[in-house]
Image (tube, rainbow, N blue to C red):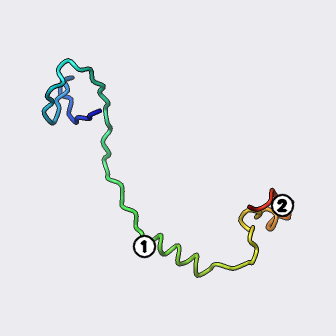
Amino acid sequence: MRSIKGTVQNGVIHPTEPIEGHDGQQVVITFVEEETESPQPIDDSSWNDLMTFIDAHAVDTGIEDLAHQHDHYIHGTPKREPYP
């Protein structure tokens, strides 16, 4: 499958590049909404700052299943299925 860009003028499609060898071939036309703004690049320094903060404030509780069984340790509910 090949995609061709083009524009519509007065209801007629005008491709932006030549199309040869496709006379009589059926086509599907999809209208694409162009973005008005390009997405902002992700600033890796913010992610690195967060990871540095987490590493600096991490606490070793010695509880291997703390994340899996957090309701048990925080609220006193019965433990769920065993931790893998």
Q: Is residue 24 left or right of residue 46?
A: left
Quadrant into which the C terminus falls = bottom right
Q: Which mark is residue 45?
A: 1
- Which badge, 2 or 1, comes first in the chain's sequence? 1
In the image, residue 59 sits, relative to residue 23, either above or below, namely below
Residue located beneath label 2 in the image:
79
x and y percentages locating residue 32 in the rendered image: 31, 36
Task: Classify mark 1: helix, strand or loop.
Answer: helix
> Where residue 24 sits in the image (x, y, percent)?
20, 17
Q: Where does the N terminus fall, quadrant-wise?
A: top left
| Distance of label 2 from label 1 (alpha carbons) | 39 Å
The residue carrying pointer 2 sits among few (fewer than 14), some (14 to 19) or many (20 or more) residues within 10 Å by Cα, namely: few
Q: Position of residue 18 (x, y in %)?
A: 13, 33
Q: Quadrant of residue 6?
A: top left
* Marking on residue 2: none
* Kind of residue at disc 1: Ser
Near mark 1 (Cα within 10 A), the count class, few <14, some 14-19 or many ≥20, is few
Q: Residue 62 appears at what percent x and percent y?
A: 75, 77
Name above or below for residue 25 compared with residue 4: above
The amino acid type, in three-letter code, at marker 2 is Lys
